[in-house]
Image (tube, rainbow, N blue to C red):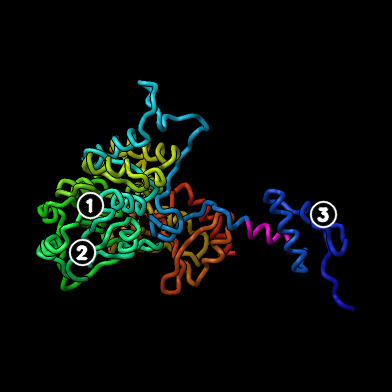
Amino acid sequence: MTERPAGGPDGAWPPSVDALARSLSGLPQPLLVDAARQAIAEGRPGSAQDLVDAWRRRLLSPVVNATGVLLHTNLGRAPVAHNQPAVAQTVEFDVDSGERGSRQGAVGGLLARLCDTEAAMVVNNNAAAILLVLAALASGRSAAVSRGESVEIGGGFRVPEVIEQSGARLVDVGTTNRTRLADYRRAIEQHPDLALILKVHTSNFRIEGFTETVGVAELATLGLPVVVDLGGGLLDSRCPWLPCGPPRWLGREPAAVQTVAAGADVVTFSGDKLLGGPQAGIIAGRADLVERCAFHPLARALRPGGLLLSALQDLALTYLRRDGLSIPFWRMASASVASLEARATALITSDRITPAAMDAVPGAGAAPGTTIPSFGLAIVGDHLAALRGAARPVIGRIHEGRTLLDLRSVDPADDPSIAAALLLISA
Ligand SMILES: *Cc1c(COP(=O)(O)O)cnc(C)c1O
């Protein structure tokens, strides 16, 4: 006797798509119908609910970031909480005059105050910020970049390609490992159409050994606008928003305030890296240059929505209140190792799980090469898939044959989710 595949919920064969779809749950009806149809077409109607469950797991969903990479690009970089009721907002409205206002005015003003610049504006991410600055200030002309800074940041962001897209021409300056002020001077002599000097933070890599770079203060003596892509978005190297000042792991990460003080005319940076906010790109600097960006036709295509602006406004006000510990990124980064150790100890339910010291990293190319002392849990073997299978998936990492769960990148409120996931492997 040949084995007959399982029929539909009513035992009919072939099962009806509708009947099978009605027996499924977890997604809107049209998707249940799709799952039923696909499962029947594959001759496996019994797998329809598994398909629905697999599709559900592909939806954007909350996870616990126990990777120890605080700004994990695949996990949305800086965690941000933002709730906004469905109400009208003064996105482009001036309440005093009753007339149309500037979308960039409110948040731009706060960010300019934080960066100590004349003006600032917001676009959708830092790649957009650099594209807009180059298009507005150098399109049809040239932009000088040190060869050592002509980098690829990841996710398709390559400095030479962004310059090309902006309509500007790249002028390579110096060599991969050494660029001197004299190299920039020669570039200026040879390229009378040079519109600006672009300095790029080489976020995710370091050149070591026989190297030389030119600082912003020296670049500012050359007489051309100096644009600095800071990448990371550290506002001020003194970290006045933290009770204990700058953490040691920050090292010499460049910051907006100090870069502007050194003579940069424009700085750009991401909103969701060290700034600790939503995905955004910030352009801060001289009022005349920021204005040229704001009035460039591309600005309309790159403009942020009210949701982003109000999240950034909350963040800017938090910085101005110097309340850094209520910014999730800075809270994670500032937690004491002792507090992480206490949480790790409280999570141990089996002798297969041991507390362990480990190193976290800021991530997202910020402060490359530094580590933040951390603490978490270690389990011999690779349990990543089991942990990802939890109701609230827990994302860890493997190191030397052990599964590590780093608590520095985990909000303490998520510890119960880790406890629940651990049950799946200690069973
Ligand atoms: C991250 C980064 C970018 C890209 O920023 P997005 O906000 O991801 O678009 C550009 N430049 C540098 C130096 C960076 O570190």
Q: Nearer the viewer, residue 90 or 276?
A: 90
Quadrant of the rendered image holding ligand 1: bottom left
Q: CA distance from mark 2 to mark 3?
A: 65 Å
Q: Which residues are magenta?
A: 46-55
Q: Is residue 251 above or below residue 319?
A: below
Q: Identify the amino acid type marked 3.
A: Ala
Residue 402 seen in this snapshot:
yes
Q: Identify the amino acid type marked 1.
A: Val
- Say which quarter of the image contains residue 161: bottom left
Number of numbered labels in the structure image: 3
Q: Identify the amino acid type marked 2.
A: Ser
Residue 373 seen in this snapshot:
no
Q: Which residue is mark 1?
A: 227
Q: Is residue 23 left or right of residue 347?
A: right
- In primary-sequence order, the first of circles 2 and 3 is 3
Q: Nearer the viewer, residue 315 or 424?
A: 315
Q: Is residue 340 above or below residue 210?
A: above
Q: Which residue is mark 3?
A: 19
Q: Position of residue 40 (x, y in %)?
A: 77, 64
Q: Residue furthest bottom?
A: 1
Q: Secondary structure at mark 3?
A: helix
The label number, if any, that marks residue 146 in the structure image: 2
Q: Is residue 235 left or right of residue 389?
A: left
Quarter placement of the C terminus = bottom right
Taken as a whole, is the magenta stretch helix, strand or loop? helix
Mark 2 CB in 8 Å range of ligand 1? no
Q: Secondary structure at mark 1?
A: strand
- In primary-sequence order, the first of circles 2 and 1 is 2
Q: Is residue 190 above or below residue 247?
A: below
